[in-house]
Image (tube, coloured by chain):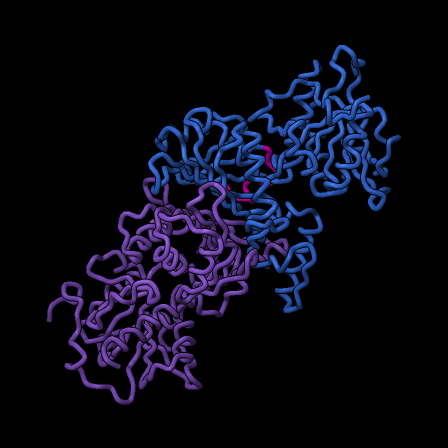
Chain colours: A blue, B purple
Amino acid sequence: MAHPLDSFTLPSFSEVTLKKQGYVFAIVGATGAVGAEMLTVLAEQDIPIRELRLLASERSAGVELMFKHQSLKVQPISEAALKGVDYALFSAGTEISAAWAPKAAALGAVVVDNTRAFRMDPRIPLIVPEVNGALLTGREAIIANPNCSTIQLVVALKPLHDRFGLERVITCTYQSASGAGREAMDELRDQVVDLLNFREVQHDIFPRRLAFDVIPTIDQRLEDGYTGEEEKMIRETQKIMGLPDLPVSATCVRVPVFIGHCLSANVALKQAASREAAREALAAGAGIVLSEPGEFPTAADVAGQDEVYVGRVRVDRSNPRGLEMWVAADNLRKGAATNSVQIAALMIQKRGG
Amino acid sequence: MAHPLDSFTLPSFSEVTLKKQGYVFAIVGATGAVGAEMLTVLAEQDIPIRELRLLASERSAGVELMFKHQSLKVQPISEAALKGVDYALFSAGTEISAAWAPKAAALGAVVVDNTRAFRMDPRIPLIVPEVNGALLTGREAIIANPNCSTIQLVVALKPLHDRFGLERVITCTYQSASGAGREAMDELRDQVVDLLNFREVQHDIFPRRLAFDVIPTIDQRLEDGYTGEEEKMIRETQKIMGLPDLPVSATCVRVPVFIGHCLSANVALKQAASREAAREALAAGAGIVLSEPGEFPTAADVAGQDEVYVGRVRVDRSNPRGLEMWVAADNLRKGAATNSVQIAALMIQKRGG
């Protein structure tokens, strides 16, 4: 069999056995913050699941997690454990995805990968179903799930692009601790408790104290002064929107919030939009919940929700063809687990059910 | 005597008695978060002070505060209490300033007002000494101190404007609770403690819970979707920079931090600047501390400092004539108390000592 990255196609539906009793799903990285949310989202969906396998590194193997009132034991990832899997949702880190996603695909699974391992690979589609789900043919072996902040940005940009055209996007983010994983949430909580008790504050996951402070650097620092997270937002937005030359800039900032990312987007349009016209376009946009004029969603509002919330839409006072808006979403759900499950659901549909 | 707002001039230095033994200062609003910081900053300065009067509303009168190892009792504001004052620093709310600053000025005091009462009055100079201190003649009766976020923005913009010219500014802020006063800081602390103890969270100063969340609205909501705080940043920046038509947009966000405001500024320049040239200009800028390349200041770093801290300077990937930068300052000090005292010191100098 050819390397799945070269072809990124699977046998078409007619060639595969129809799974009358449902599909075999695997969650790779089931014990992480996103993995746990994948279990929750899968349990809420009506995707018929015959078997769910929870896989993780050796370190997490043995842990038991609940799925639909059933206790499932986490197994170490292996070729044997991946055999027979129809849909594998990966969220166990870039290294694990780079090593195991091609193997899972070679074994016949559709892989939805929530790491940066394949996102910018031109052979791999980077999908947000509301935005570019139409690209999927149902024959893809590996599909990349974008960065959390990027997902909520592009969902909000899509209806504006369709109606007015995008010229340039500048964004600043307000990203929660959970974007750095479960241990990062624990670290924030411990820092807050230590500070309130006049104890010395420790940091390990974050480059410095996050409690009662903000950290304007996420991921590695690049040569030109941007960060890895900002580069993801720039390049992934261009790829998902199908606008490789769209000028995008981003400043990504960690804030002391547990769950829910917010961002402010300054969007220059090709055609001027009134505030009302922009609101109309956004209100009709797929996957968007629009606040009343002047109102806004916050991280606390969107935690546990699957939609992207948009508020504070206004015409940019510094550019008559510009808009300012505020976008919030649950980074563990729409920013990760929900989007991955939506991609799997779309693939099931494209492959003929 | 003419209304001080019509003339906004005081007797010139030659007409006033030379205060050999120093000046009589008053702090109006001495019990507030900014007022307390004014006491600290005044004690640190070498301005010769013969007498310091602490004034406040009836509600706070009687409170005792320390100044240079001396206990001073807060008095209710009155014409008698203002008589003989040389420099009156107001920070007791817009209504008190609107009512009392003209009276103080009519009684011969130089008023430095840290509310929005006079900031946009074309007769009143709005001053950040490093940026437009040269406008002061020494004959002004009332001088306005800008909004906290505006001050740190314009200090960082000034050297870029001088060297490359400003074309447009877009900013997003990360503002601490103390910008809303001492009670707001208490509210944030109480909310955090209540949340950690599974108690119901209250809010009164903030429009909703700030603990572990961000609130993208500060001050009143305006008709076009901007807020009062954002309008201040836009208009005050234009006035202080002397660029009334400079396109500026702002998104002002409260974050769960006690002291220190941060902001991200996307600056379009008339002339392109390399990252190195921009860093050189900023490093030489008055009142600026520049971080090493890739490094950044946070709210925790700048709390208690008088300078404006700039980091993460980079050429905007979405505009070759643009820069992105991160700016942090202590909103109670350079954003309020320090800047007010610096204005008073500059007036003392302009008036001939």
Magenta span includes A231: no
Provide the residue span drawn in magenta: A296-306
Q: Is residue A23 left or right of residue A62?
A: left
In the foreground, B313 or A111? B313
Q: Is residue B190 visible?
A: no
In the foreground, B83 or A248? A248
Above or below — where is B326 with respect to A60?
below
Above or below — where is A242 with respect to B290?
above
In the foreground, A265 or A212? A265
Residue for point 52% across, 47% down: A251
Residue for point 64% across, 57% down: A207
Above or below — where is B17 with respect to B253?
below
Residue for point 45% across, 55% down: B278
* Residue A179: x %, y % from top left: 64, 45
Q: Is residue A64 left or right of residue B303?
A: right
What secondary structure predominates along the stretch shown in magenta? Answer: loop
* Residue B147: x %, y % from top left: 36, 59
* Residue B150: x %, y % from top left: 37, 57
* Residue A298: x %, y % from top left: 52, 43
| Residue at the extreme left of the image, as rendered | B1
Q: Is residue B161 left or right of residue A335?
A: left
| Residue at the extreme bottom of the image, as rendered | B21
Above or below — where is B93 with respect to B264?
below
Among the 4 quarters of the image, the one containing residue A51: top right
